[in-house]
Every structure is written in C-alpha cells, then in structure tokens.
Image (spheres, rainbow, N blue to C red):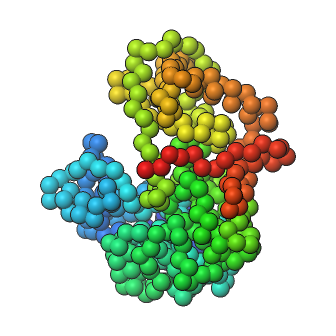
Amino acid sequence: MGTATRRRRLVDALRRDGALTDPRWIDTFRKVPRHPFLPRFFVPENGLWRAVAAGDDDWLDRIYTDRVLVTQLDDDPSAWQDARLRGPLPGTPTCSSSMPAIMAIMLEELLVETGNRVLEVGTGTGYNAALLCHLLGSTNVSTVDIDPSLVASAGAALAEHGFHPDCQVADGERGLPANAPYDRVLCTCSVSAIPPDWLAQTVPGGLVVTTLNRPIGAGLVRLTAGEGATGRGRVLARDGRFMPLRAHRLADPPAVLPAGNGAEQRTSLPISAVLNPSSRFEFFAGLALPQVAATYDPADPESTVLVHPDGSWVSHTAADGRYAVRQGGEQRLWDLVESAYQDWKALGEPSREHFGLTVTPESQEFWLDGHDHRWPLAVGPQV
C-alpha cells in the first residue's frame, strides 16, 4: 500500500472521529506526508522502548495510524541509537510526534486566516510545521525548539520536502521576538502557566492556542491577546494533551506507601470520574484539588493513588463494581473529592468548555460562566 493511500485512510479516520472538519486542513493532511519526519522512533515493548527505523516491517503502519510516536528519551539524542544496537531500553519520553487527531484539533482551533503569521513553539519532528507551511506558506511560519538536535533534523526534513519556515533554537517560553508580532501562536507542548511573552508578541485580537500541564484537568485553551501581556479566552471542549515545555515540567508525585494504613470506606465515585479526560467532572476536580496528582501503589497494582506534596494520600480500589478508598496524611483527600463533586453538581455539572481563563501581568485565573468563582491557573511545583 502506498503512502498516499495510507494518508487518505488516516484522514478518513480523523474525519469520522470529528478531529478534522475544516476542508482546508483536510486537504493539507491529505497532501503532507508524515513519514519523512519520522525516520526513526520508539515503541513500547514489555515496559521498555524498542527502536524502530525506516524500512522496518511496522514502520509505515505505525506512522499512518492515529497514535503518538515517541522520538526521544530522557532528553538524550543518542538513546535511539543505543536502543537500536543493544535492544529495548528504559527511559522517560521527552519528545514525540503527537497523535494526528490532537494535531488536527489544535490546528483547527487556531482559526488561521490567509496571510496569518504563526509562531509554533515546539518544533519536534517538523511535521506540524510542515502542515502550517503547506496552508499558510513558509514565509509566514516561525518555529522554535530548545533542543538543537531536534531543530537540525526537523529543518533538514522540512527543506527536503520544500518547506522553509524560520527554524530557530530558542527557549520557547520566550517566544521569538525577532519575528514578532504574530497573528497566531501555537504551542505543541503543554504549559503550567501562560508565558507572558507569547501574548506580548501576538497582535491584539490575535490568538494563542496551547495545552495546559496540570496533574488533573489538563487540556486545550485558546486566548485572544489584548494589549501587552494580557489575554482572555476559553477552555476548549475538544481536548488535547501534550508533553510539557521543559521549563514547565511538574515535579514527580511524592512517594507514598499507603499499604496497611487508613481505614477502608466505601464510595460511589469511580476514580475515572476524577482522572478520565472524558469525565465532565475531571476539569473541575483539577481546580478543586490543586497539586494533587495520580500515581500508583507498587504493592497494590489494582489501586490508583492520589497524592499531595504534603504527603497526604488516598488509595482507590475497584472490585466487583464497588469502590473503596483508604486515606491518610494531613488532608483527607477523598473527602475533598467528594465535597468537590457535590459543589460541581450544585453548579450544574459544568464541563470544561464552561470555563474561561484571564491572563494579566499580575494573575492568571480560571472563571466559570455566570459565577464569581476564581481559581489560579498555576499548580506547581515544577522541576
């Protein structure tokens, strides 16, 4: 099967799933190949990462399905070669080619118009920049990444296929002032707070689209830039999750050993109500439980653990359709979950698109349509 047929089938799948709706982006995804930007990547295998290269039996099949493909481990450009020579390796993904569905959603939510000048933060493989160049023209696209090896490989792949955006090695949190102002800023990494430079480098009325890096309740936001480093916008109904910008990585959840601690109590709430992005409650749960993150108990793989930096924890277990929790520490986290759930129901069970975001030099906070409630955006701590 040729790559053009594979692209067409991928686009058809994205349209069926509702990720692609704009005819301009449908045409762009059909015409811009993904495989030139993914000559090698990693796939999970028995808890490790196996190196895949162009020409391997599963190379094209993996590229032209709607899946994320990890391209770097532990910020180490040599890890792929090591895995190719020595076999699958452990590691933490630090760069990837995102799921095409998420890329399509973000590009459509950018609401680009002919002639718009766009800054992309997070060059990665260069595939997303290629899509932007195809639709808007290379002279209207700037892209930055903090990793020189990624910028070099992406720039080469882009040029080889006729795309020539301005590719720069730079700290994406600072934007790219040399080419400002921009009509649109798109970040293909997630952030724990909106970098002020992005808004300052966007023309008033221009748009910034990014994803939030939050332990619970992440997702897409779109801001309309005001004067200076100000903006106001919405949390978007269509969801997307990305690896964080390096400076916005959150600290790992604290280690807890809940086994044998805390009295068991029954609950009617599944943990999926708190953690699953498809749950209407998930976004509100993240607002009500800042700094609370999900992890697991090595001694009990059937349970999910929520932890707070102060050492408070709750272990949630499901068995035979019934849910039980144990909790300990300074705060009773599940009691807070239950209370937040009742507050959410009293507010009319708002889903993520009912929340807005206001950014000023002094504060960044969420708000809820028709209410006076305010919640700070930043959750910290970062690594």
Residue that sits furthest to the right in the current view: 370
Residue sitting at 49 percent across and 35 percent down? Answer: 309
Residue sitting at 52 percent across and 66 percent down? Answer: 173
Residue that sits furthest to the front in the current view: 362
Residue sitting at 69 percent across and 55 percent down? Answer: 363
Q: Compared with residue 351, is residue 312 higher up or lower down, i.e. above or below?
A: above
Q: Left or right? Give the position of 125 relative to 269.
A: left
Residue that sits furthest to the left in the current view: 86
Q: Residue 232 location, x and y as percent? A: 74, 61
Q: Left or right? Give the position of 311 relative to 69.
A: right
Quarter of image, res 270? top right
Q: Left or right? Give the position of 54 relative to 255.
A: left
Q: Residue 95 location, x and y as percent? A: 39, 60
Residue sitting at 71 percent across and 50 percent down? Answer: 366
Quarter of image, res 76? bottom left
Q: Residue 348 location, x and y as percent? A: 80, 36
Q: Left or right? Give the position of 281 relative to 380.
A: right
